[in-house]
């Protein structure tokens, strides 16, 4: 089995952001992974695509490579944290805020899938079925005494009875008490606190 790796060091992104993209391609075929990276909206996807193409080229240069890129898949893909650059941003009232410019080391390993060769197996000898037990018998083959009684069908209601039930339900819904309109509140009427 052919394996190859490629890495990019000091990529100007955080390891967490790169890990989101690397999670999408892990375990996929290289062509599917390249397509996913091509249409990804993440900026770090371009750097990951470069590393993946480099790993594919490294696999092609190895001795014993079958020449079929279709059989390559992404074995592992991970991002390690690199050194961070510390910078200062001016803040209000004479203060300063720390800005951390992170870097990451991207690593991608590809491997060749083994060929799936189907082995022709001899057919096992046919098994002779044992005598049928009472549990294995079908319901029809059992004696009538052992069968469960069939369920009784539900009595069907007549259409007229259903119509009456609907009318009764509608009458109950409309039979609620009428509500009174709220009384009007007069403004400016009443005692004031000026004289007190």
Image: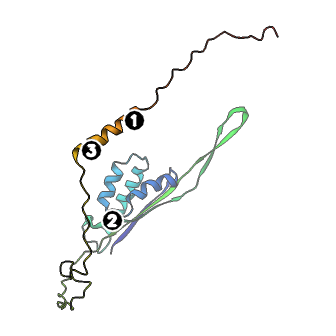
Real-space Cα distance between discs 1 and 2? Answer: 67 Å
Residue 83: give x, y in percent of width and height: 58, 55
Q: Which badge, 3 or 1, is on the more N-terminal residue? A: 3
In this view, the residue in front, 38 or 134, is 134
Check the picture and name the quadrant holding the C terminus. top right
Query: Mark 1 falls on what kind of element?
Result: helix
Q: Which badge, 3 or 2, is on the more N-terminal residue? A: 2
- What residue is at 37 percent from the left and 48 percent from the top? 40
In this view, the residue in front, 43 or 131, is 131
Residue 183: give x, y in percent of width and height: 56, 18
Residue 29: give x, y in percent of width and height: 31, 62
Check the picture and name the quadrant holding the N terminus. bottom left
User: How many neighbours does mark 2 have within 10 angstroms: few (below 14), some (14-19), or many (20 or more)?
Assistant: many
Q: Which residue is mark 3?
A: 162
- What residue is at 73 percent from the left and 34 percent from the top? 94
Q: Which residue is mark 1?
A: 173
Q: Which residue is mark 2?
A: 73
- What residue is at 55 percent from the left and 57 percent from the top? 82
Query: Mark 3 falls on what kind of element?
Result: helix
Mark closer to the observer (1, 2): 1
Q: Does the CB distance between marks 3 and 2 fall below 8 Å?
A: no
Q: Which badge, 1 or 2, is on the more N-terminal residue? A: 2
């Amino acid at each position: 089995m052919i394996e190859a790796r490629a890495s990019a060091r000091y990529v100007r992104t955080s390891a967490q952001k790169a890990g989101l993209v690397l999670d999408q391609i892990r375990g996929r075929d290289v062509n599917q992974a390249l397509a996913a990276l091509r249409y990804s909206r993440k900026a770090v996807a371009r750097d990951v695509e470069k590393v993946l193409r480099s790993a594919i080229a490294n696999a092609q240069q190895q001795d014993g490579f079958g020449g079929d890129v279709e059989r390559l898949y992404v074995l592992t893909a991970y991002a390690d944290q690199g050194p961070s650059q510390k910078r200062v941003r001016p803040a209000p009232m004479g203060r300063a805020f720390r800005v951390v410019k992170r870097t990451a080391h991207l690593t991608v390993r590809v491997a060749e899938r083994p060929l799936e060769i189907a082995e022709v197996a001899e057919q096992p000898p046919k098994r002779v079925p044992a005598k049928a037990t009472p549990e294995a018998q079908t319901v029809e083959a059992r004696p009538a005494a052992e069968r469960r009684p069939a369920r009784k069908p539900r009595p069907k209601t007549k259409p007229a009875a259903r119509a009456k039930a609907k009318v009764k339900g509608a009458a109950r819904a409309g039979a609620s008490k009428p509500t009174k309109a709220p009384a009007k509140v007069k403004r400016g009427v009443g005692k004031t606190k000026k004289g007190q």
